[in-house]
Amino acid sequence: MNTTKKQLLTVLLCAGFTFYASASAALNIGDTAPALNATDISGKKVDLHAIKGVTVLEWSNPQCPFVKKHYTSNNMQTLQEHAKKDGVTWIMINSSAPGKQGHLDNDQAKKLISEQKASPTHVILDGDGKIGKAFGAKTTPHMYVINANHEIAYMGAIDSKNGVNPDEISSATNYVQGALNALKAGTTPSPSATAPYGCGIKYAH
């Protein structure tokens, strides 16, 4: 399939929404991450600036084919498990508004996580979009790695292959794992910012 047809198919799969976007202009690498104070689906309070160590933020929409690519292949679950073994706090965020594709309530989110065998530290439902817009999150998935000083160390795509075929994953460069490896080694992630790809986040407006 040529590039034009591939992009058209991807847009259709995302129900007409842009399938990738420029890296967020809301934040720059090295900026202090916006405040994130929320309650997760288990009723636990989450304060990003109180977390010790590295944090990953993952924007998700279970109906997005790009998200499905990384969950049906077990790629995202593997990333979560490896990160948590290294003491990383992993926060999954769903910013789909009520009535929009991918919106979940607490019970639906708990059931989904169980079915996916996913292991994020926290799952936050951001139906009003305040958290997503504070970070400039554009797509699902859109990934952020926050260092121990609560600064943006990496933001953008999960990896270098922006299609929906799980077979691409094995040959892709995983930017999130690369950023986590760099921080663990005491070095700066490279690249530190990439263009996120996926379905546009289904904000209310």
Image: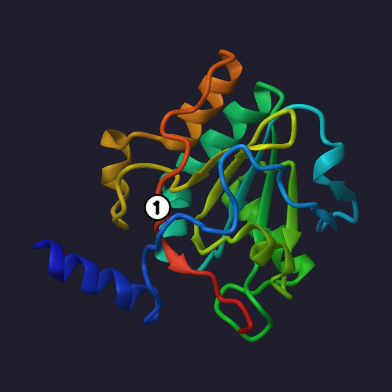
> Residue drawn 37% across and 63% down?
20
Which residue sits at x=60%, y=52%?
Answer: 27
Count of number-bearing discs? 1
Position in image of residue 7 (x %, y %):
23, 68
Amino acid type of the residue tagged 1 in the rendering:
Ala
Using the image as rendered, state which of residue 40 and residue 38 is in the foreground: 38
Question: Would you say 15 lies left or right of 144 here?
Answer: left
- How packed is label 1: few (under 14 Cα within 10 Å), some, or many (20 or more)? some
Q: Report the residue that reaches farthest toward the top.
A: 185
Judged from this view, the residue extending furthest toward the left is 2
- Image colouring: rainbow
Q: Position of residue 35 (x, y in %)?
A: 80, 52
Left or right relative to 186: residue 192 = left
Q: Residue 87 lies in what quarter of the image?
A: top right
Of residues 155 and 88, which is closer to you in this image?
A: 155
- In what quadrant of the picture does the N terminus appear? bottom left
User: Based on the displayed image, in which of its 4 quarters is residue 118 positioned?
Assistant: top right
Q: Is residue 202 above or below residue 151?
A: below
Q: Name the residue beneath numbered marker 1.
A: 195
Seen at 38% across and 73% down, the residue is 18
Which one is nearer the viewer's eye here, 20 or 109?
20
On screen, 43 above or below 99?
A: above
Q: Secondary structure at mark 1?
A: loop
Image quarter hosting the C terminus? bottom right
Residue 22: x percent and y percent?
Answer: 40, 59
Q: Is residue 164 above or below residue 179?
A: below
